[in-house]
């Protein structure tokens, strides 16, 4: 039962849930990009190249033999080209997203930097008033002693001599 409780606490953390959402969104985005490349981008490129279907481009190393029931051995470089284009689209999208987030963060930081300082709290204002009254009356302010005694938890053998 302790393991179940620890697992429930682990799963309910915000970062784990955010990661799970990111993975699910990423998988869905991957399907969208695959469809975009296979069904929208590559057909016009193939048509422009003389009706070539990139998904079917391959170098056959050994032809299939129906009599011997051996499958074809081939290098599917067309599928690799499709995957490479998918990678470039996903990479560019992630780059643009990160660039946008960084721009928003820089803008927010600049706005915080340019913002006028916050008004003092009532307690701070009262302390400033007391300080100013003390300065005006000529009363010297109390300062902490120059050397404080060593902490009580140190014994005599660990204390150093002070001059």
Image: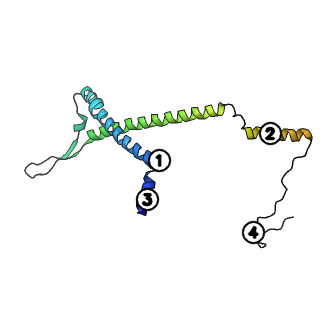
In the rendered structure, find residue 154 and report the number of the disc placed on it. 4
Sequence-first tag of 2 and 3: 3
Q: Secondary structure at mark 3?
A: helix
Instruction: List the residue tagged with mark 1.
Output: 14
Inter-mark Cα distance, 1 to 3: 16 Å
Sequence-first tag of 2 and 4: 2
The answer to whether residue 11 is above or below residue 47 is below
Instruction: List the residue tagged with mark 3.
Output: 5
Q: Is residue 60 left or right of residue 20?
A: left
Callout 4: few (<14), some (14-19), or many (20+) C-alpha neighbours within 10 Å? few
Inter-mark Cα distance, 2 to 1: 42 Å
Sequence-first tag of 3 and 4: 3
Query: Mark 1 near mark 3, Cβ–Cβ under 8 Å?
Result: no
Query: Mark 4 near mark 1, Cβ–Cβ under 8 Å?
Result: no
Instruction: List the residue tagged with mark 2.
Output: 128
Q: Nearer the viewer, residue 97 or 91?
A: 97
Disc nearest the viewer among 2 and 4: 2
Residue 72: give x, y in percent of width and height.
Answer: 17, 47
Q: Nearer the viewer, residue 123 or 34?
A: 123
Inter-mark Cα distance, 2 to 4: 38 Å
Q: Secondary structure at mark 4?
A: loop
Q: Residue at x 85, y 51 (%)?
A: 143
């Amino acid at each position: 039962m302790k393991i179940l409780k620890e697992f429930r606490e682990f799963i309910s953390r915000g970062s784990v849930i955010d990661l799970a959402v990111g993975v699910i969104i990423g998988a869905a985005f991957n399907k969208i990009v695959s469809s975009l490349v296979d069904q929208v981008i590559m057909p016009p490129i193939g048509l422009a190249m003389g009706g070539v279907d990139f998904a079917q481009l391959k170098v056959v190393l050994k032809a299939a033999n129906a009599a011997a029931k051996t499958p074809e051995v081939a290098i599917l470089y067309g599928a690799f080209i499709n995957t490479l284009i998918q990678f470039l689209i996903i990479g560019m999208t992630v780059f643009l997203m990160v660039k946008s987030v960084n721009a928003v963060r820089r803008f927010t930081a600049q706005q915080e930097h340019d913002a006028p300082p916050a008004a003092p709290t009532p307690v701070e204002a009262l302390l400033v008033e007391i300080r100013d009254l003390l300065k005006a009356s000529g009363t010297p302010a109390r300062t902490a002693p120059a050397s404080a005694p060593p902490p009580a938890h140190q014994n005599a053998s660990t204390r150093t001599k002070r001059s």
